[in-house]
Image (spheres, helix red, strand yellow):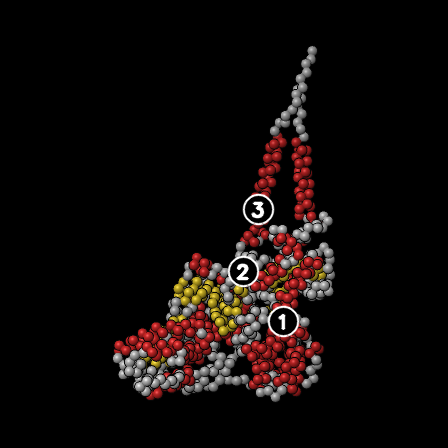
């Protein structure tokens, strides 16, 4: 009997070969049809290259945590010191060549710009005005030069990352075709390349860039190439919407949408976060001038008066330069490395007034015209109302050593309104943070009372801007009361009509205190969601003679009348005073330093349990590193208050029909008391429910201006670290975004499946095959 088996291994090989051929056929038919097949006439077809991996990350991808990669660019920070020097005299400008002869970022280029464009218009103007203009000119000139250089540096870094830097396959900053009114930052000239790039170092498109969007629509329609907008920071929602609208208006996407298909990525946005790291521009002329100035001795500088023993003299120096790390959230002498991030970018050259902002805009516009960069004069933040700038986030970090991360929030400025006052506001908040750390909390109260000229303010606190702001707010509160009770106002008329008694008198102590702040404390981080202030009052009397020599207190009034008048005041006036303290622009500095007080109190408490960057400063009792940045005197503020108390804020006579004079007197005195900081702490669920995008916004703000979802806020942050931040590696929030994660998790499963398939095939190969048996018979 003979047995014959079918060739099983041969059949398996044939099956494998068939599957390989089938897979290749499907790949060619589906994956690469636009490459190997003739172009499809269908208007909805797009090149397959549009779907190849894009650089960077999508706007909705998990945000990066930790440091980004860095790129370098030439900068001219050395020129900023000239902003605090006297403007050049005409003889200083003799011998200069035309500005085109000098390199941007050098002293001679800046002087030549001044000589040609600004100095002629300031002839015979007051020296003080020329000095202010010179300061703004220097700051804006340096900002413009550095901004242009940084944009170029970012673009070069992006092109290096996508491997097209210096490539002959692309044209850079050139018009691709006369038919299309755009000059892409990089665009392919070879037909097999289908992707061009437009690189942006800002959060939003300028008006000029918005107008160019239609040009890119035409470019995509005419060339069939994709345009990728690469941003260093996440764009605003308005910018994303504008680019998305442009993408949908391309011919291919109009056809796809009409056919019920999703839009293709014809014009797409990608993020490539990176930290700009300035490299000083080589400037021999500056070095020579620096040596000359050093040889001639220090330039004269303004100093404040020595207060001596007279509390009526100005306390503190004249405006002082920032200290340590730019002066923002870094103590003098601290071993910390500041990060060039969102806040520093926003306030680097912030003018002090609208007039200075307008002049600075002229400087930038002229510089932009010279550089061929029409977007240079645009505000990269789209306008920020720096009067609303407040420290709303602090974190005790550890990256190679203790550090501090922080973020300020501010409201956007109305369109076409210039941004100004940013540096002053940030320094005010930062100085206050450190003052709240170094002085004991018992010092954080001020008192304006005509009977107590010697109990106005703590002596150390009285040499700081935080102390000045609290005392000025106390005085301002009396002025607010005067506005509200003025009889010509609707509220004042009701108030006057409702008062009772012979003198219609109200005398009270009224003072500002913190209301509970709403915060979220989370693993070394503090988010300050709300920090309202409250106004308290109680009936009280002083001995000093009041308005017009009237009797102290309300002597000719019964207790019942006094209580009724007090009740009227509480109902009509007090709520509006509290509203003004929490919203009116004249109290903005008070709100700013109080939010810093909330942050400092949390930092104090954290420093009690662990070593922090500034543990050594707590209750040191010496605030001399943060002196007032403008001269002021506590006694002078008190004298202004006494004048208001004795003379009144307004004089109004009201006469009855019988001709009798009605006298109404309201005495208000009190203070500001920030010794305690009550807080309402949110749990994780409540916090994430109320502010789901806040944690992402503050992380992004460390590197560039950020927005928080639909909230009308701009977040500007920064960080100081014990080691340079660029030494650390970028990391995704989620490990699933790393390729290694998928390799490590899927490879074992893949090997198990392949091994199982092989084993199954072998087992089947060992089974007897059906055979045909022939039987023969013999003799």
Between the C-alphas of marks 2 and 1, the distance is 30 Å
Of the residues tagged 2 and 1, which is closer to the observer? Answer: 1
Residue 392 % position (x, y): 47, 67
Q: Is residue 655 left or right of residue 378?
A: left
Kindly identify the residue that appears in the image at 61 percent across and 37 percent down: 758
Question: In the structure shown, which secondary structural element does the residue marked by tag 3 occupy?
Answer: helix
Residue 577 % position (x, y): 39, 74
Q: Tell me the residue that label 2 is attached to.
A: 65
Whether residue 504 is visible to the viewer of this picture, yes or no, is yes
Image quadrant where residue 608 sits: bottom left
Q: Earlier in the sequence, mark 2 or mark 1?
A: 2
Kindly identify the residue that appears in the image at 58 percent across and 49 percent down: 743
Between the C-alphas of marks 2 and 3, the distance is 25 Å
Q: Tell me the residue that label 1 is attached to.
A: 376
Q: Residue farthest to the front?
A: 657
Q: Nearer the viewer, residue 115 or 160?
A: 115
The quadrant the N terminus occupies is top right
Between the C-alphas of marks 3 and 1, the distance is 49 Å
In the picture shown, does residue 400 fall above or below 80?
Answer: above
Kindly identify the residue that appears in the image at 61 percent across and 32 percent down: 764
Q: Residue farthest to the top?
A: 779
Residue 155 % position (x, y): 65, 65
Q: Nearer the viewer, residue 113 or 287?
A: 113
Q: Tell me the residue that label 3 is attached to.
A: 746
The quadrant the C terminus occupies is top right
Kindly identify the residue that appears in the image at 29 percent across and 75 percent down: 564
């Amino acid at each position: 009997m003979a047995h014959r088996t079918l060739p099983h291994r041969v059949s398996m090989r044939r099956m494998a070969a068939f599957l390989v051929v089938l897979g290749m056929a499907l790949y060619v038919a589906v994956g690469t049809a636009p490459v190997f097949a003739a172009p499809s006439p269908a208007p909805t077809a797009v090149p397959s290259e549009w779907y190849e991996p894009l650089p960077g990350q999508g706007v909705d991808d998990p945000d990066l945590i930790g440091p980004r990669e860095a790129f370098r660019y030439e900068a001219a920070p050395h020129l900023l010191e000239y902003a605090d020097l006297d403007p050049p005299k005409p003889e200083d400008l003799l011998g200069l060549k035309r500005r085109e002869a000098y390199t941007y970022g050098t002293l001679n280029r800046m002087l030549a710009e001044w000589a040609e464009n600004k100095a002629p218009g300031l002839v015979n103007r007051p020296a003080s005005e020329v000095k202010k203009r010179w300061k703004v000119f220097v700051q804006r000139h340096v900002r413009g030069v550095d901004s242009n250089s940084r944009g170029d540096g970012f673009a070069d870094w992006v092109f290096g990352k996508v491997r097209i830097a210096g490539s002959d396959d692309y044209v850079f900053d050139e018009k691709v075709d006369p038919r299309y009114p755009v000059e892409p930052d990089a665009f392919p000239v070879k037909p097999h390349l289908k992707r061009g790039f437009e690189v942006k170092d800002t959060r939003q498109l300028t008006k000029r860039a918005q107008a160019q969007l239609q040009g890119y629509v035409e470019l995509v329609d005419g060339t069939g190439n994709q345009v990728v907008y690469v941003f260093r920071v996440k764009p605003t929602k308005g910018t994303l919407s504008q680019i998305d609208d442009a993408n949908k208006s391309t011919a291919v996407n109009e056809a796809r949408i009409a056919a019920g298909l999703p839009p293709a990525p014809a014009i797409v946005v990608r993020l490539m976060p990176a930290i700009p790291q300035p490299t000083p521009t080589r400037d021999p002329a500056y070095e020579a001038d620096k040596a000359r100035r050093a040889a001639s001795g220090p330039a004269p500088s303004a100093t404040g008066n020595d207060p001596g023993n007279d509390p009526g003299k100005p306390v503190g120096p004249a405006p002082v330069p920032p200290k340590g790390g730019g002066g923002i959230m870094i103590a003098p002498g601290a071993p910390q490395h500041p990060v060039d991030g969102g806040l520093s970018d926003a306030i680097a050259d912030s003018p002090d007034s609208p007039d200075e902002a307008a002049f600075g805009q002229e400087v930038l516009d002229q510089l932009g015209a010279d550089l061929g960069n029409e977007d240079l004069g645009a505000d990269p933040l789209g306008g920020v109302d720096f009067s609303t700038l407040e420290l709303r986030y602090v974190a005790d970090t550890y990256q190679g050593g203790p550090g501090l991360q922080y973020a300020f929030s501010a409201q956007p400025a109305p369109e076409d309104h210039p941004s100004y006052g940013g540096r002053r506001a940030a320094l005010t908040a930062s100085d206050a943070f450190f003052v709240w750390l170094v002085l004991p909390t018992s010092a954080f109260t001020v008192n304006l009372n005509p009977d107590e000229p010697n109990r106005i303010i703590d002596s150390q606190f009285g040499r700081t801007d935080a102390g000045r702001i609290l005392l000025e707010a106390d005085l301002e509160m009396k002025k607010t009361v005067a506005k509200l009770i003025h009889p010509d106002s609707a509220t004042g008329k009701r108030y006057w009509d409702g008062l009772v008694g012979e003198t219609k008198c109200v005398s009270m102590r009224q003072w500002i205190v913190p209301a509970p702040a709403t915060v979220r404390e989370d693993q070394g981080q503090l988010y300050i969601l709300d920090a309202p202030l409250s106004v308290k009052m109680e009936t009280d009397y002083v001995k000093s003679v009041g308005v017009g020599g009237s009797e102290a207190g309300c002597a000719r009034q019964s207790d019942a009348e006094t209580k009724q008048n007090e009740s009227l005041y509480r109902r009509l006036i007090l709520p509006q005073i509290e509203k003004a303290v929490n919203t009116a622009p004249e109290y903005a500095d008070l709100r700013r330093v109080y939010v810093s007080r909330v942050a400092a109190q949390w930092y104090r408490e954290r420093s009690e349990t662990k070593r922090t960057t500034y543990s050594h400063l707590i209750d040191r009792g010496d605030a001399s590193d943060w002196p007032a940045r403008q001269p002021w005197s506590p006694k002078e503020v008190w004298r202004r208050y006494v004048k208001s108390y004795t003379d009144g804020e307004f004089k109004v006579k009201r006469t009855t029909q019988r001709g009798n004079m009605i006298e109404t007197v309201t005495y208000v005195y009190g203070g500001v008391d920030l010794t305690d900081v009550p807080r309402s702490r949110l749990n994780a669920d409540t916090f994430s429910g109320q502010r789901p995008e806040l944690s992402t916004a503050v992380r992004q703000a460390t590197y560039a201006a950020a927005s928080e979802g639909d909230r009308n806020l701009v977040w500007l942050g920064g960080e100081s670290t014990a080691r340079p931040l660029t030494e650390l590696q970028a990391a995704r929030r989620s490990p699933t975004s790393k390729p290694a994660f998928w390799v490590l998790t899927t490879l074992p499963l893949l090997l198990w499946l392949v091994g199982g398939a092989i084993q199954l095939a072998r087992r089947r190969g060992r089974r007897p095959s059906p055979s045909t048996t022939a039987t023969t018979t013999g003799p």
